[in-house]
Amino acid sequence: MAINTQKVLIGGIAAGVVMNIIDFVTNTYIFSAQMKAASDAFKPGLSDQMMQGSAIASYIVMDFVLGIALVWTYAAIRPRFGPGIKTAFYAAVLFWIVTAVAMSGYLHMGMVPTGLWMSLAFIGLVNYLLSAWAGAKLYTEASAG
């Protein structure tokens, strides 16, 4: 059965909204001071660059792109694993692993302290799980007729 592109977009936008909310709360209220200190310790003024309007816009767009890709992945693996939260969580864990590996470079080059990286990685997992759940709730297969 073909992937329902319209439902991927709807679910992906919902997942992107969830991601953006969690990222906003995390980056603005929970870890703002630690992230600013780590960024500026790595390169003075970097935190100011990261908070410019164009940078923030790119983060917002990136969350929507990731949300759509996450729901597309859920739709792609759904025939094998079945519909529901378990399959959504498989997609979420896949995305989390890929993201954690990609972002580990920041840890290894000393840009982010280990404790902050681990905390952000954990929140990233929660973010992907909740976003995948939200997107999967809205995804249905196209009708056969």
Image: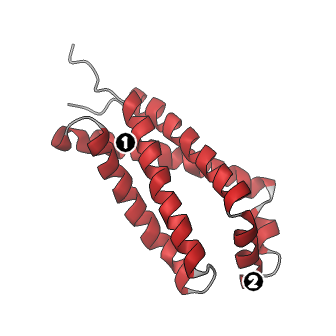
> Could you tell me residue 58's position as x and y percent?
66, 53
Residue 69 visible in the snapshot: no
Name the quarter where the N terminus is drawn: top left
* Amino acid marked by disc 1: Trp
Between disc 2 and disc 1, whose residue precedes? 2
Residue 92 horizontal side relative to residue 57, left or right: left
> Could you tell me residue 137's position as x and y percent?
38, 31
Name the quarter where the C terminus is drawn: top left
In terms of depth relative to the viewer, which is nearer, 45 or 137?
A: 137
Residue 22 horizontal side relative to residue 41, left or right: left
Q: Residue at x 27, y 44 (%)?
A: 87
Q: Dot 2 surroundings within 10 Å: few (below 14), some, or many (20 or more)?
A: some
The image quarter in which residue 142 lies: top left
* Label 2 to label 1: alpha-carbon separation: 38 Å
* Amino acid marked by disc 2: Ala
> Can you say whether 73 is above or below 2 in the image?
below
Q: Residue at x 30, y 51 (%)?
A: 90
Query: What label does residue 122 carry, if any?
Result: none
> Can you say whether 94 is above or below 39 in the image?
above
> Could you tell me residue 81's position as x and y percent?
19, 43
User: What number of labels is visible?
Assistant: 2
Which residue was labeled with disc 2?
41
Q: Tell which residue pokes out farthest to the top in this image.
A: 145
Which residue was labeled with disc 1?
72
In terms of depth relative to the viewer, which is nearer, 71 or 88?
A: 88
The image quarter in which residue 51 lies: bottom right
